[in-house]
């Protein structure tokens, strides 16, 4: 495994990190086995969040005996000083540690939210106090809209930035990376496999590592994923012409309107598992597996046609997807 500095934090992090969203789906025992495997393969950067249900708790339990080997990054959706201070304490307890390496402001999605977290009584104020008190090491920000992050990292106290980047999603990346090089902000890349829809993980990860990023954090909940992803951290980052063609062809099939499975649309009041429906719809339309997709769709407890079109999911989607229309199309195809 190769390592890079996380910007001006000075922390050495594995180029392949551990995304903590999928670990919500496994048992505590399996989580420990998966995390142990990651550590043994040289992965030392672990990302989680207050909003990822029991992800913090599972990582905390898994890392307790090997805490010194790990760099823990977590985050909170709290926008106020009071709320962020409370969440920092909760994270410390849940992660079973007295120190969190990086604490981030989670999903800063628009100008109003950015102004709120940077205000006198905003989340940043609590993070600065926590850093001064030795509870956290460094302050970061995460989001999907790169123009807002570009503005945020001009703030001296913000030392890391986390955003999506993959072979499909490249808009605004070079401008943001130029600014991180200028400011020295560490760069954490999420959604490297576009929410799991890019199937050649090795090529997708190596493609990103060819850019000036610090670490890439694919989500993992199987040992095979850990091994495959970790191996990308050992291989050359430059892709051959044939490898680049394979990746570009796969990206071209996806287009721009597709679900990244970030799950911010959930929960649905009707109980619709929106990301799972779109995943199956992708197997139907992109991978020519209509029978397979239909069979699994029939097994879902709540179907796409249960949508009442309240539109709440669309308001929460960081990619502004027309979810209601996409659900209608999926229901028509897989009924």
Image (tube, rainbow, N blue to C red):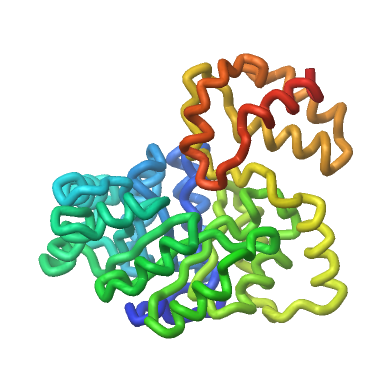
The quarter of the rendered structure image containing the C terminus is top right
Q: Is residue 189 visible?
A: yes
Residue 288 shown left or right of residue 80 in the figure? right
Q: How many marks?
A: 0
| Percent coordinates x, y for residue 98 in the rendering | 19, 58
Image height check: is 253 above or below 214? Answer: above
The quarter of the rendered structure image containing the N terminus is bottom right
The extreme front residue here reads 111
| Percent coordinates x, y for residue 157 in the rendering | 25, 72
Which image quarter: residue 57?
Answer: top left
Residue at the spot 80% in from the left edge and 57% down from the top edge: 252
Image height check: is 324 above or below 6? Answer: above
| Percent coordinates x, y for residue 320 in the rendering | 56, 43
| Percent coordinates x, y for residue 26 in the rendering | 51, 38
Q: Nearer the viewer, residue 78 or 60?
A: 78
Image height check: is 65 above or below 304? Answer: below
Q: Nearer the viewer, residue 308 or 89?
A: 308
Residue at the spot 57% in from the left edge and 56% down from the top edge: 191
Q: Is residue 26 visible?
A: no
Q: Nearer the viewer, residue 81 or 135?
A: 81
Residue at the spot 69% in from the left edge and 59% down from the top edge: 168
Residue at the spot 64% in from the left edge and 42% down from the top edge: 259
Residue 78 shown left or right of residue 42 in the figure? left
Residue 114 shown left or right of residue 279 in the figure? left
């Amino acid at each position: 495994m190769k390592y890079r500095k996380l910007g001006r934090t000075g922390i050495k992090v594995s180029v392949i990190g551990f995304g903590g969203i999928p670990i919500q789906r496994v048992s505590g025992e399996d989580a420990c086995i998966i995390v142990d495997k990651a550590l043994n393969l040289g992965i030392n950067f672990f990302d989680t969040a207050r909003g990822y249900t029991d992800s913090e708790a599972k990582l905390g339990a898994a890392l307790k005996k090997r805490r010194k080997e790990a760099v823990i990054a977590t985050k909170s959706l709290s926008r106020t000083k009071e709320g962020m201070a409370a969440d920092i304490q909760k994270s410390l307890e849940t992660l079973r540690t007295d120190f969190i390496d990086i604490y981030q402001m989670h999903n800063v999605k628009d100008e109003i939210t950015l102004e709120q977290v940077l205000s006198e009584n905003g989340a940043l104020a609590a993070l600065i106090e926590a850093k001064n008190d030795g509870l956290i090491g460094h302050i970061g920000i995460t989001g999907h809209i790169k123009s807002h992050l570009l503005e945020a990292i001009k703030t001296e106290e913000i030392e890391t930035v986390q955003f999506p980047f993959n072979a499909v999603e490249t808009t605004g990346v070079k401008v943001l990376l130029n600014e991180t090089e200028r400011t020295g902000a560490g760069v954490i890349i999420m959604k490297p496999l576009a929410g799991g829809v890019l199937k050649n993980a090795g090529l997708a990860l190596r493609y990103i590592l060819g850019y000036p990023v610090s670490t890439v954090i694919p989500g993992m909940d199987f040992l095979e994923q850990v091994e495959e992803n970790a191996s990308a951290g050992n291989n050359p980052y430059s892709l051959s012409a044939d490898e680049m063609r394979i990746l570009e062809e796969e990206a071209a099939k996806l287009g721009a309107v597709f679900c990244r499975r970030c799950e911010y649309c959930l929960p649905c009041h009707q109980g619709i598992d929106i990301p799972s429906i779109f995943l199956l719809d992708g197997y139907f339309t992109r991978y020519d597996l209509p029978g397979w997709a239909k069979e699994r769709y029939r097994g879902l407890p709540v179907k796409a046609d249960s949508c009442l079109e309240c539109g709440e999911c669309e308001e929460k989607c960081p990619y502004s997807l027309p979810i209601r229309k996409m659900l209608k199309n999926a229901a028509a195809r897989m009924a």
